[in-house]
Image (cartoon, helix red, strand yellow):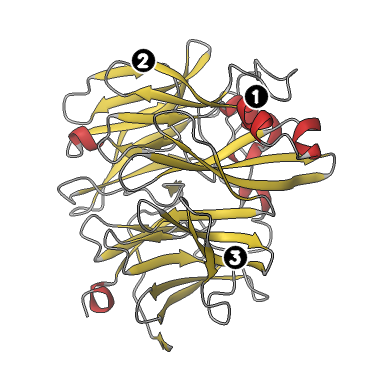
Amino acid sequence: MNTIEYKFVAKAITQGPKHHFFGYYGICPWDATSHYLLCLESDFHDRAPGVGDMAVVGLVDLASGKFEPLAKTKAWNLQQGCMLHWLPTGSDRLITYNDLQDNRFVSVVLDIHSGKKRILPHPISALSHDGRQALSLNYARLKSLRPVVGYAGLPDLFADQNHPTDDGIYLMDTETGENKVLVSYEEVRAFLNDNDEVQSHKLWFNHTVINRDDTRVAFVVRWNEPGIEIKHTILMSASLGGGDLRLLTDLDASHFDWLTPEMLFGWVTMPEGCQYYLINDNSGEYKMVRPDTLTKNGHCSFTRDGTWLLTDESPDEENRQTLLLWHMLEERLVVLGRFLAPPPFRGEIRCDLHPRWSRNETQICFDSIHEGTRQIYVMDVSAVVNV
């Protein structure tokens, strides 16, 4: 295994005094022309957004560096933003973002050139690769149970139920808005009928990640207890056609991405310990991936051919977050940089790097507060990935 560490330039494409960020990982912020980069702008970043707090949805013109406001949203947080996406059916002009309108959380499809909008009846948590289908979660339930990824402003209509039948992961048509509950909390409870804690706790779902051929979704099942933010996590998958639930690990799980339509890579716990693993979604077979080198949990995503892994790491003892690339076949580690994450910014207001690939996979971007404000940085990695 070779380790390469040298200076890469992290260029800030946004500037203070206002704060700019994209939010989540595994989503491409660049448009199809690579002229614009999608992001949010906020007046603050030292507290969680409350009821009525707005963020500005906008674009950075990468040629001029100018931030161009497009809309405002009341459905956002500092970890995942408002789940911004370029809609694959029109990735040179159509974006989606979540919002609070008419006393419900929705997603907005906006044409950035004409300004035309249409409203979908559920907020988006993930998009299929063809852009025809979206997954959705109950963000009011998340706000009450896992505030860091929820939205303020609405009560959870299923707050009195541990395992509601009519709530869970929703599947929505992005053209018509037609939708249904794809995986309900009750369905998962029944599937995990031997797990006493699942039976007795109020569950929530998160991290919906669709596989590479749009046939399955991986997601986590979680619950908490007083004073314990996340008591336990179970990793599962389901068919996008409905049903066919599979248990991938019930020992614990964090972040993950699909390497192939069948293989999931992620930071999970197996009988051998907590580490990065490759898990076969069909067979359940798994193997540990270089525990001597990939030693920390991170927000992981792959190039389209699965050659390069991009991920970050949680802050070290010097409060620095490491950004790295890993060649899956050659087992080659490339350290891209280490960025200060000051101690006050932890928990709900932390700034994970959440690295993301450009469309041509020669650049990455990430959120960081290492220069004092929350901004977006771009880094050219073509010298590495094109070798």
Question: At 59% from the left edge and 34% from the top edge, which residue is drawn?
Answer: 150
Q: Name the residue under label 3.
A: 314
- Mark 1 secondary-structure assignment: helix
Residue at the extreme top: 102
Q: Which of marks 1 and 2 is in front?
A: 1
Q: Horizontal placement of 224 versus 256: left or right? A: right
First reached walking from the N terminus: tag 1 or tag 3: 1
Q: Name the residue under label 1.
A: 186
Q: Horizontal placement of 295 versus 331: left or right? A: right
- What residue type is disc 3 on? Ser
Which quadrant is home to the N terminus?
bottom left
In the rendered view, tell whether residue 60 sits above or below residue 303: above
Cα–Cα span, label 3 and label 2: 39 Å
Q: In the rendered structure, find residue 365 and report the number of the disc placed on it.
A: none
In the rendered view, tell whether residue 51 sits above or below residue 359: above
Residue 297 horizontal/vertical position (percent): 58, 64
Crowding near the residue tagged with mark 2, few <14, some 14–19, many ≥20 C-alpha atoms within 10 Å: few
- What residue type is disc 2 on? Glu
Query: Along the line of sight, which residue is nearer the eye, 161 or 146?
Result: 161
- Mark 3 secondary-structure assignment: loop
Query: Along the line of sight, which residue is nearer the eye, 284 or 83?
Result: 284
Cα–Cα span, label 1 and label 2: 22 Å
Residue 57 horizontal/vertical position (percent): 37, 35
Which quadrant is home to the C terminus?
bottom left
Residue 318 horizontal/vertical position (percent): 65, 76
